[in-house]
Amino acid sequence: MADVRKMKETMIIIGSGAAGLSAALEFAKNGTKSILVSDMPSERAQSVMAEGGINAAVDTQEDSPELHAEETMKAGRYIADSKAVHQMTKEAPKIIKDLFEAGMAFTLNEDKKPDVRAFGGQSVKRTFFAASNTGKQLMYVLIDQVRRYEAEGLIERLTGWEFLKLLCDEKQAYGCILTHKVTRQEKILYGKVVVASGGLNGMFGNATGSVRNTGAVTANLFALGVKFSNGEFIQYHPTTAKLHAKNMLITEAVRGEGGRLYVLEDGKPFYFMEEKYPKLGNLMTRDVIAKEEWMLMQKGKQIYLDMSHLDQKTAGAKLKGVMEDCQNFLGIDPRKKPIPVMPGIHYFMGGIWVDAKHRTSMRNLYAAGECACQYHGANRLGGNSLLGALYGGRIAAKSAMEDKEITELPEITNTNNNEKQSVEGSYIENLQKLQDILKKGLGIIRNKEILNDAREKLDRLLEETKNTYDMTATKSENVSLRERCILGKAMILCAKARKESRGAHQRSDYPSEYEEYQKQTIAQLVNGEIEIYFEKAGESDDD
């Protein structure tokens, strides 16, 4: 029998980005110890890369939490949990206040108060920001707070450790197995588990975010029967620039400050978004712009983002990071030349199913941040991701402290995962196959033929990798490869099952949106088979 006292005192957090740090701080403020597990330092978490801002309705332009919630629901095409969304937007002003008081370096207006900018899909300015480095400044504040509690012994950080496997039985989760990415030493932790491991970038490869967010944790949970939701909804950001290995994000803040999208018609700029959507123009929701761009690109058009007309003082103060990135990585001075852009994978609205309290379908297992499916529905509003991560981390921690303690659990002594040496193929080659299948199968526009082809290729890849083990890869990479293939198949099946076009899920063979699908998609592995069904968000919540 393991040390039950330790179980009661320690919470395990997988991931040390904004959601993970938020959960750790909530635990610490309530006198509960937590262990932060991550393969990289928090300073290198994907949250650092967030540029745009954090949404909150704070008495600007007659804004309100109710309007913020309504626009969040509208952007998500009304399949998110309305109750949970309203709770998040209600707490958003307090989150901004807490950050400001903690020293967050928000960009200030003339009255020396935090400034706000316009973001897509929102009728008022409600996005608080720190120039074009919001994520970096946010993480500075959170890391500083964590260090204080670390000195008090309330937070312990395990950096350089990778999640290998969740420990659970048919009733509950009770810990996890970790492996060190350098020494390959293994460690067992017992306790309730909060997953804050980020999105599924590594399963696609060319996303704007970090490929260190491999999707391995989510895939392991899915393989153990934990529910996964809305896997078909993948946000393609309309303004990314193609680099050699990945796409570079050109933040929505450029359009928020007045940047314009165009294509050339007869040698002259044609501002396609302003022509088709005169009210919001370049600030339509990301799914709408990405689809418009895709259709133009099918005609051979190059999309351009122009910010040369912006006031140079404003651009220099609010978009300095963007201009530096364009000059350093693209060789373009955006003050003088337009930026060639294209849609690129940016965010995963789908993820581990959670209720309004961030409980997963398995007892004593919680999830928050991009790895969790909550708040964003079929399409996320810019500025809501950091908000969802900060708020979700707090709620997950509160739920973990409120729920009943684990009283009994088995002692784990053998962590062998039946390693088998591969005689052909390699981890890298098979991962690239998975990435290619998912990129093609879950592009901006899908149809039955594309999805069936992706499913057939995934089935073949699953057969090919059944007994492989690449000795040059880490144990976590080997163990998670097949699990990620299974999760990828679930995402394809989610897209097949949703026979409509809604938000970021667009099908050429089902171009309309139907009321019968105004529900979330649920995928679950049951007795080795993937089951897909639909339910209204909030229907299966306990309270």
Image (cartoon, grey):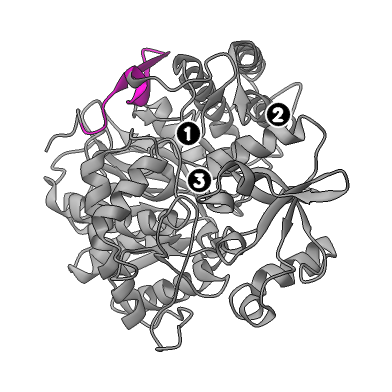
Q: Mainly helix, strand or loop, the magenta region?
A: strand
* Residue type, mark 3 in image: Thr
* Residue type, mark 2 in image: Asp
Count of numbered marks:
3
Please tell me which of labels 1 and 2 falls first in the chain: 2
Q: Secondary structure at mark 2?
A: helix
In the rendered image, the quadrant that contains the N terminus is top left
Q: Which label lies toward us, 1 or 2?
A: 1
Q: Quadrant of residue 291?
A: top right
Depth check: give the residue in front, 418 or 176. 176
Q: Secondary structure at mark 1?
A: loop
Q: Secondary structure at mark 3?
A: loop
The mark found on residue 285 in the picture is 3
Disc 3/disc 1 C-alpha distance (Å): 9 Å
Depth check: give the residue in front, 118 or 28. 118
Instruction: Kindly identify the residue that appears in the image at 50 percent across and 26 percent down.
Output: 487
- Up-down: is 178 above or below 104? above
Q: Which residue is mark 2?
A: 436
The mark found on residue 238 in the picture is none
Q: Which label lies toward us, 3 or 2?
A: 3
* Residue type, mark 1 in image: Gly
Q: Badges 1 and 2: C-beta atoms under 8 Å apart?
A: no
Q: Is residue 215 left or right of residue 62?
A: right
Q: Position of residue 364 (x, y in %)?
A: 23, 41
Q: Position of residue 429 (x, y in %)?
A: 75, 30
Span colored in magenta: 516-538
Q: Which residue is mark 1?
A: 503
